[in-house]
Amino acid sequence: MFNLFKHEIRSRWRAILGWGFGLILFGAIYISIAPGLFEHIKILKDLSIYELVGMQLGSIEGYMASVVLVYVPILLGIYCIIVSTSTLVGEEDNGTLELIVAMPLSRWQILTAKAMALCVVALFIMIIASIGNAFILAVIKINNPINVTPFGFFTALISSLPLAFGFIMTGFFLGAILPNRRLSATVMTIFFIASFFVENIAGMVKSLEPIRYFSLFNYYNTTETIFTEGPQLSDIVILLGIAAVFFILALISFKRRNITVGAWPWQRGKITD
Amino acid sequence: MSSEIVIQTNDLSVYYGAHRGIKDLNLSVQKGEVFGFLGPNGAGKTTTLRAILDIIHPTQGSATLFGLDSQKDGVAIRERTSYLPGELSLDPSMKANYFLDLLGSLQKNKLDESYLEQLLERVDLDPSRKIKEYSHGNKQKIGVVAAFMGKKDLIILDEPTIGLDPLVQQTVLELIQEVKKKGRTVFISSHNIKEVQTVCDRVGIIQNGELIKTEKVEALINQQLKRLEINFRKEPPHDAFTIEGVKEISRDGNLVMFEVSQDLDGLMENAVPYGIMDIETKTVSLEEIFLAFYSPQNKGGQNV
C-alpha cells in the first residue's frame, strides 16, 4: 500500500512543481499590483458588485485576502477536481485500474493510498505556493505599508488545505459512486461552483444565510482578519470532518464498485461479507 | 497433476443491470492444470475471469480460489495469483521497467530480478522506454512479463497472445508449459484454438454466459467429433446416410467422407449394404470441434 502511495506522489512531481510555481506566479501578480491598484480602488464609491464575488476592497489587506486567499484555493480546487475525479474513475475509464485491483491489495488500501497521496500532493503544492507568496509579500512590503506579516500570509494560504482535502474527498466519493469520469467531473464542477456562489450570495442576502453552511467555502476565512487571528480551529475541524465523511462514503462505494464496468450503484453485484 | 482444486465456481452469475454476463457457471480447475476457456466474443469469458478475481462482484453464486472466498479473501487470493487482462491498458507516461518494478513492489514476495531479466530477454523487450513509445505487441509483451514475473501459483491469462508475433506467441506457450511443469496452474481464455489445443489439459466452452462443455482436450477431440473416410465397393445413393449426428462432407465416386458427432453404429449399419472396402479415421482439430459447437444448426453444441 505504501508503495502505491509513493508511486502516486512520485508520478505527480511535475504537477506539484507546475501548480506550486503557477500559484506563486498568480499570487505574485496580484500582490505586486496591490499597492498601486488599491489607490485606484479607493476612489470607487460602490463596491457592492465586488462583494457579490466575495471581494472586500475597503483596505489593501482586505483586497489581498479577497483576491489571493479566494482565488488561490479556487485554482487549487480546480486541480483537486481534475485529479480526484481522474484518479479512480478516470483510471477505470482508461483501463489502467484493472491491473491495480488485481494486485494483492484490498479496495480500501487502494483508495486510501491514492486519496492520501493526493492530499500530500495538495500539501506540497500549497507549501510551495505559500512560501513563495509570503516571500513576494516580504519583498513588496519593503516599499509599501501593508499590515500583513509574511508569516500571517503563509498561515492564511496554507490554512486553505482542509478546504482542498474536502474537495479531494468529495471528488473521490463522486468518482466511486458515479459510472464514469465525465459524469463525476461534471457533478463535481457543479458542486464546486455552487459552493462558491452559495457562500458569496448567502453572505449578501440575509434570507439565504442558512444555506451558506452547505458550502465548503463557508469554512475558510477569506477576510483580512485571518492575517492577524489565523484560521479558526472549528472551521478546520468541520472541513476535515466533511473530508472524512466523504472519504468513508468513497470507501464504501469503491468496495461495491464493479471495476471496468462502472454502472450505477443499484446495478452493482452483491457483497457477501 | 494433483487433485487439489484451485478454482471452483458455484452457480456464479453476473448481470450488468438486465444484461446477462454469465449465468450459473460451475467449473473447477485443478492444481497443476492448464485450463482453456473458449467462447466467441461476448460469451462471458472475460466476465468470468473478472468475477473470480473480484474485479467485478457476482450477482449470484460464489467463487473460491485455493479454497478461499473470492470476495472475503481477495487479498490472500491475489497474493498467489497473477492476471493478464484481455484489454490491457498501461499508463503511457511510465517507463516499462518502472511499471514492472511498481507491480513487483505491490506483491507480498520480493521479485526474482534474474527471472524478470530472463523473461524480458525471452520476449525480446527493451524495458527502458516509455510505454507510449511501444507498439501494441510490445505493450502486450509487458503484460505477459508482468503476469509471469511473480512466479504465482495461479496465472490467469485473458487472450495472452493477442497482437504478438508468432515467435513471441511460441515463447508464451513455452512459458505456460514451464509453469505447468512446476506444478502451478494456468487459466487461459483465448480465441486462438490452436494455442489452446497445444497447451491446455482441459477446456471449458462457454456460450451466451453458460458453460456448455468441460472436457479434456484429448477426449474432446477423440470422443466428440470423428471424421471417417469410407471406400465403398459400390457408390451409395445420396440419401443413404440421413442419420442424426452424421454429415456427409465430401464424395468422390465410391470414396465418401463423413463427419460423425454421434450414432457411429447407425452409420455403419447403413454403410454395410454398399460394401466397405476400407475405412480411414481422420484427425479433427479442436478448432473444428469449436466451430461445430457454434454452428447455427447446433445450438449450444448438443449435437457435438
Image (cartoon, helix red, strand yellow):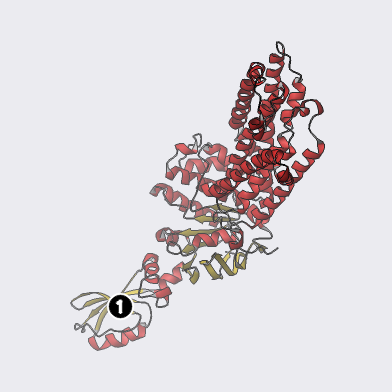
Residue furthest to the front in view is A45
Chain at tag 1:
B
Frontmost residue, B271 versus A185: A185
Res. B287 image quadrant: bottom left
Relative placement, left or right, of A246 versus B42 is right
Quadrant including the C terminus of chain A? bottom right
Q: Is residue A61 above or below residue B281?
A: above
Q: Is residue A152 left or right of residue A184?
A: right
Q: A17 and B34: which one is in front?
A: A17
Q: Position of residue B303 (x, y in %)?
A: 39, 78
User: Where is A3 relative to A42, above or below?
Assistant: below
Residue tagged 1 = B247
Report the side of A240 relative to B241 (left or right): right
Above or below: residue B65 compared with residue B144: below
Residue at 56% over, 69% down: B27
When asked about the image quadrant of residue B222, the answer is bottom left
Position above or below: B68 against A5:
below
Q: Let me know if residue A187 appears in the view.
A: yes
Instruction: Name the residue type under label 1.
Output: Lys
Residue closer to the observer: A150 or B181: A150
Quadrant of image for the N terminus of chain A: top right
Q: Is residue A3 visible?
A: no
Q: Residue at x 24, y 77 (%)?
A: B256
Q: Position of residue B302 (x, y in %)?
A: 42, 77
Image coordinates for residue A262, horizontal then vertical, percent: 56, 55
Residue at far top of view: A143
Q: Secondary structure at mark 1?
A: strand
Q: Residues within 10 Å of mark 1 (few under 14, many from 20)?
A: some
